[in-house]
Amino acid sequence: MEPAKDTEVALELYTPMVYGIALTHTRNRDDADDVFQEVFLAYHRKRPHFNEEEHRKAWLIVTAVNCARQNTGSSWCRKVVPLQDVVPLQDSEEADTSVFSFATEEQDQLFAAFSELSEKYQTVLHLFYFEDMAIRDIATVLDIEAGTVKVQLSRGRALLRERLKGEYFDE
């Protein structure tokens, strides 16, 4: 398959997954867009060959996680002061649209609690719940033991449960 067509097929199949991983790690749309572009640009440039579709999916997941780590770990991201902290907004239409917002307050609270988790919990929870990946597949992609994935899923769920206790999420 020609490179442009191969990249187009990958984009069609994996856009939601790659963007979801990027958004989970970066926590805002602008950085998620950057990570998304980096992943598919790397895919197009390297033109990796895969024997199975699962290998392509795994390559994209690993690349997305690595690009997101590089993005959030860069000095540019660590040293930036958000504009809304410096200059108060006068008009609600000038609000920062790069910060992700959901349809309901419950969804916003869930995303906020999810964003507070460490990266290792976010990654396994995202792959398990949003990408419907099996534990052994997550372990293979992240190059960790299946038992480690189970522990991270369990601890991540417990942390989310603890953070979401209260007004909307009583047990």
Image: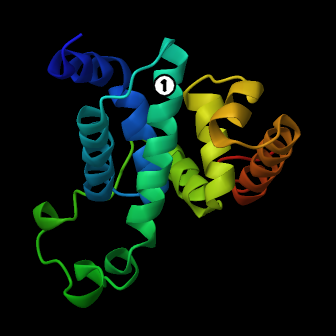
Q: Is residue 132 above or below residue 85?
A: above
Q: Is residue 93 above or below residue 128?
A: below
- Visible residue check, residue 103: no
Query: Which amino acid type is marked by label 1?
Result: Lys
Question: Quarter-wise, where is residue 49 in the image?
Answer: top left
The reply, left or right, for residue 78 in relation to residue 134 is: left
Q: If the image is split into quadrants, where does the N terminus sit?
A: top left
- Closest to the observer: 139 or 102? 139
Residue positioned 69% across, 51% down in the render: 121
Q: If the image is split into quadrants, where does the C terminus sit?
A: top right
Q: Is residue 140 above or below residue 81?
A: above
Question: Quarter-wise, where is residue 10 in the image?
Answer: top left
Callout 1 secondary element: helix
Instruction: Give the residue pinned by disc 1.
Output: 57
Query: Badge 1: few (under 14), some or many (20 or more) residues near its Cα, within 10 Å?
Result: some
> Which percent across, then down, holds residue 66?
48, 52
Residue lying farthest to the bottom in this orientation = 86
- Closest to the observer: 89 or 16? 16
The reply, left or right, for residue 14 in relation to residue 136 is: left
- Closest to the observer: 103 or 4? 4
> Which percent across, then down, holds residue 15?
33, 28
Residue positioned 66% across, 31% down in the render: 128
The reply, left or right, for residue 77 in relation to residue 127 is: left
Residue positioned 50% across, 36% down in the render: 61
